[in-house]
Amino acid sequence: MHLDDIKYSAAKIFADFVAIPLLEGQKVIEQNRPSLTAIESKAALTYLAMQWEDENSGKGLSKVVYEALVLSALRNTKSDARLTRLAVHENISGYLSSADETEVSKQVDAALKRLTKRKIRHWKEIDEFCLTFEELTRLQDRLVATENQESDFISEVERLVSIELDGDPKIDAKLQDYRDRIVRVLDSFLLKTGEVFAASVASGEIAVIDRTILYNTVYSDLTEHPSDSVSLDLFPDVALNVIARLCASKNNNVQSHLRKLSDSYTLFSFLRETPDVQKATKKIFGHGKIWLDTTIVLPLLAESFFGEQDNRRYTSAINNLNEAGVELRVSDGVVQELLSHIRISQACSTYATSEWEGRIPYLYRNYVQAGYSPSSFRSAAELFRGLERPEDDIGEYLSSNYCIEVESLSEHVEAVDEELRFATERLWREAHDERRNSNDENTSLGGSIEILIRHDVESYLGIIGLRMQEQSSELGYRHWWLTIDSVAWKIRKRLRQELEAKPTSPLMSLDFLLNSLSFGPARARLTRTHEQLLPILLDLDFAANLPIELLELADRIRRENEGAPDYLIRRRVRDACDRMRGKYGKLTRAAVDEGQDVVGGT
């Protein structure tokens, strides 16, 4: 013990003169997480992020969370500046006011016991605690690494903002304000999405995170933080473009930072819902059979055209689902829609861009934006199917590349109550009629209106029919329909409003599913590398607003570079399209038209 005292006396001197001033001087905690105001909440979130990144995926969530909170509470302690057990409890309970105090105390005491000797010292006679010198040094290194990663991320935001403001004569005056504002918007948005997921798990009802939350966050920031250097007309477009580019970044450090930030906010939100995070997340399904909608499978096909260095976000998501043991299916209706979409894309490839009537098909648009020649699309489509047995070819392609099997749902529709069948078909028909009148993007996914209605109804009701033998809460069902089609969620709401017997929902949202991989029972099956690179905000590609202009640009770049090596042409086309994709304009105006009146303070 005498040697220990000498050791800790030396450590104290080092900490007083080197470690603590360094940490305080960096102001890592104070500067980060603008969405939180209390310094203790910011510290808790910072330590949650570090602990989450350091721990293996098999450790219980409650242990990870409360050990991080204890380390956060003790972050400024040393051998002669200790905290009592009561002070540690009060520190943590201060920002978990809605949680059960008895359960929080139980979890904190358990964490203190686990950490004693390993990371903290305990003076039993007076029941006081402080960090060990080794742990203080380790946390110092982790905080420095965290600050460096945060700094790199902010630099990337600034770089993207400068691209957006290129040509603006007042760019120097605006750059820092735009950068800081976008960081604040993204931070607030990730906090809100974490709260939505945690609340969904607590309530047992899946919620979808849509773009409206992001729009509102952008406009709320303009209202809450007015500035002469930021334009109401310009900033929303710049912010949405930069955030979309960040979420689709090829930079693993950017993706890792976003994932860690998103996960730490989600853990923080769970704590505010319930003190026992592990118990709450056990409700999340750890297995299942998920039917993928055409809106999920088409991006997979499009990503097959991407280069090796491109960020294949949907492919990454599907690979992680396979890694977690989730069974993936498509109905034969989806196969028919894919084949129809490929035929439409091939037909479009034979027309000049200006001569094609209607929206440019999704698959063909992505092929051209990847830099390939329109004339080669027909042969490229043979990657997915041949001419003799196209249905079998598509099924084989999906199975061999993504472990997605074809399975029929039609027979299960008949098991569903007749009133629900009629109401569902009517609502889908109304939705498709509205889409046809508005020239919605999803109308170009493939197939006639009648076929699309039949397939949507079959998917929605077929999974409900499959569940007839299951007795479970919503989160515990085995069968799900995964779609990013916002109409499906509107129909879910309408059905619950119209029908006296509230039907269960077959819908699984992509953001909920990916968060489930991070926090649910399947988490232990993923390696930390897989988990950290789970995509963020998959449905954040706004390029559909300018498909004609993008393809016309691609045609012009090809003509101007005729005779150059094909790989060089592809690169120049791809880069030109990337630069143009962000000029949203229409996007933010559409958001306002849909009733986003947050700017007015309502």
Image (spheres, rainbow, N blue to C red):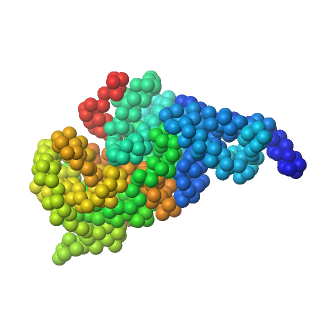
When asked about the image quadrant of residue 311, the answer is bottom left
Task: Tell me if 206 is positioned left or right of 13 in this view.
Answer: left
Residue under the point 32% across and 54% down: 472
567 lies above or below 170:
below
Judging depth in this view, the residue of 275 and 380 nearest the camera is: 275
Is residue 32 in view from this perspective?
Answer: no
- What number of labels is visible? 0
Task: Tell me if 235 is positioned left or right of 129 in this view.
Answer: left
Residue 46: x, y in percent?
58, 42
Residue under the point 46% across and 40% down: 273
Where, quadrant-wise, is the C terminus in this rendering?
top left
Is residue 12 in view from this perspective?
Answer: yes
Judging depth in this view, the residue of 451 and 135 nearest the camera is: 135
Residue under the point 17% across and 43% down: 499
When asked about the image quadrant of residue 165, the answer is top left
When asked about the image quadrant of residue 333, the answer is bottom left
40 lies above or below 457:
above
Residue 327: x, y in percent?
34, 65
Residue 337: x, y in percent?
19, 61
Residue under the point 85% across and 43% down: 9
21 lies above or below 333:
above
Task: Tell me if 298 is positioned left or right of 337 in this view.
Answer: right
Task: Tell me if 523 is positioned left or right of 55 in this view.
Answer: left
Judging depth in this view, the residue of 235 and 103 nearest the camera is: 103
Residue 596: x, y in percent?
30, 31
Residue at the extreme bottom of the image, as rendered: 388
